[in-house]
Image: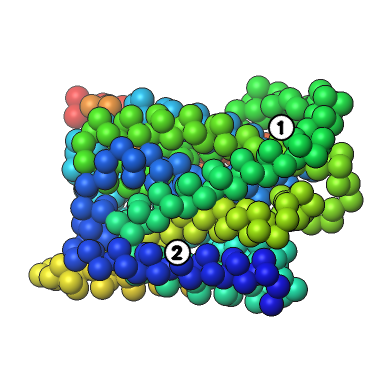
Amino acid sequence: MNAVFAGVLVYLVAQLALGFWISRRVKTEDDFLLAGRSLGYGLSIFTIFATWFGAETCIGSAGRAYEGGLWNTTSDPFAYTAALLLFGLLFAVPLWRRKLTTIADLFRQRYGIGVERLAVLLMVPSSILWAAAQIRAFGQVLVVSSELQLDFTITVAAAAVIIYTSAGGMLADAWTDLVQGIVLIAGLVVLAVAAVVSGDAAVLADIPADRISLLAPDATLLSTLEQWAPPILGSLVAQELIARALSARSPHVARRSTLVASGAYLVFGLIPPLLGLMAARTLPGIGDSETVLMQVASTHLGTALYVLFAGALVSAILSTVNSALLVAGSLLAHNLITPLIPGLSDRQKLRADRIAVVGCGIIAFLLARGASGVYELVEEASSFGTAGIFVVMVFALFGGVGGRASAYAGLVIGVGVYAAGKHLDLLAHPYLAGLAAALFAYLVVVASSRVARA
């Protein structure tokens, strides 16, 4: 076992210990899922920032920039920054004031139990895919830090995050995010400074304009919208983000924390893709682009600083996978399982939440082993089912029209058009088509209902 791998394991054990220690305060389902709705500015800002700042932001975006340039990695940090900004401005306050536990609760309040359950079935796969991406990225960090095989490191990573998540819930997640966010920022800043001091940053002046453009070389308006819409709209309806807004102690804390986190996300999220651009000139020929960031770190940092940076990546990944598994488990247990068993005590509900988290973690592990890369998983997580969810959520919050039938139509048609267009290669812009189809279906049912009543 080399020093770097040992350092990563020590850091991981310390984080697990911190999570378990804080988890002793978790007594109810509300504590487990929403930290008792008690988070102030410090914890809220760091938990929002650290949750979105995951494997795709670090490993995925650096690798994509290395391969094609900034246009190849618009999701991070640009689209997700825009999503956080829009969420803080438009959605945080009205969602908090409804006293929800999950976004599916909104659908039950507005449209009924059937729509709530359908929404859960559409949202859970996205969270599991997101968790799988983080588990795979965790495995990549361990591979670069050791001589172990990827399948084995993914197994170790999955076991660690399942235990970590099922024990602590949101309350432990918020406190560990504070530590993880500080370590992450420190690690990225150290690596950026090292790259500048070494002279690598000078190559940015010679990079071709098409590699630093946010638009693909053959971009059209529709292709650009297709690239940007899933991460922005998909994030706006993500329970990972909504849960953090609901965990704040007031609507003002929810809104302001999200806005501050969006700024931090942009500033520090720019570091990995810029390092990827540099590495394309200074370290050409790297076979696996998902290891670019770790290769850059191993080139510029000594053992002690490299351990700090590896710990920073572990911080980013732990925070994000914890949130994704917590969301998948909460949606399944809170909105599907426990309502079928009336009279459960808080302790029994808490146990159901934890069992659901473990089950979702096992599925995420299997997906992580079978995927070809981190970006592939993240891209699908942002897209699947979210077009219809977004349309229905906007009408639930801000529109006075539509009911159960229109919500069913929007959800089913939205995911059906997207899935057919994407996986059967029937449409050039499947997400936009799904979004338009969901909106059209919702409004058609509204209009038909009015005609029938007339």
Residue type, label 2 = Gln
Here the colouring is rainbow
- The secondary structure type at the circle numbered 2 is helix
The residue lying toward the viewer, choosing from 404 and 294, is: 294
Numbered badge on residue 71: 1
Picture coordinates of residue 33, whole percent (x, y): 28, 57
Furthest toward the right, the residue is: 285
Q: Amino acid at mark 1?
A: Trp
Front residue of this view, candidates 70 and 9: 9
Q: Position of residue 332 (x, y in %)?
A: 33, 62
Q: Which residue shows up at 36% across the image and 25% down it?
A: 89
Disc tally is: 2
Residue 299 location in percent, x, y? 79, 52
Q: From the viewer's perspective, is residue 267 above or below residue 362?
A: above
| Residue positioned 88% across, 46% down in the render | 284
Q: Say which quadrant the N terminus sits in.
A: bottom right
| Viewer-closest of 311 and 317 | 311
Residue under label 2: 15
Tell me the quarter of the picture where residue 308 sits: bottom right
Q: Is residue 199 visible?
A: yes
Please tell me which residue is depicted at 19% across the width and 73% down the height of the picture. Answer: 348
Is disc 1 surrounded by few (<14), some (14 to 19) or many (20+) residues within 10 Å?
A: many
Mark 2 or mark 1, whichever is nearer to me? 2
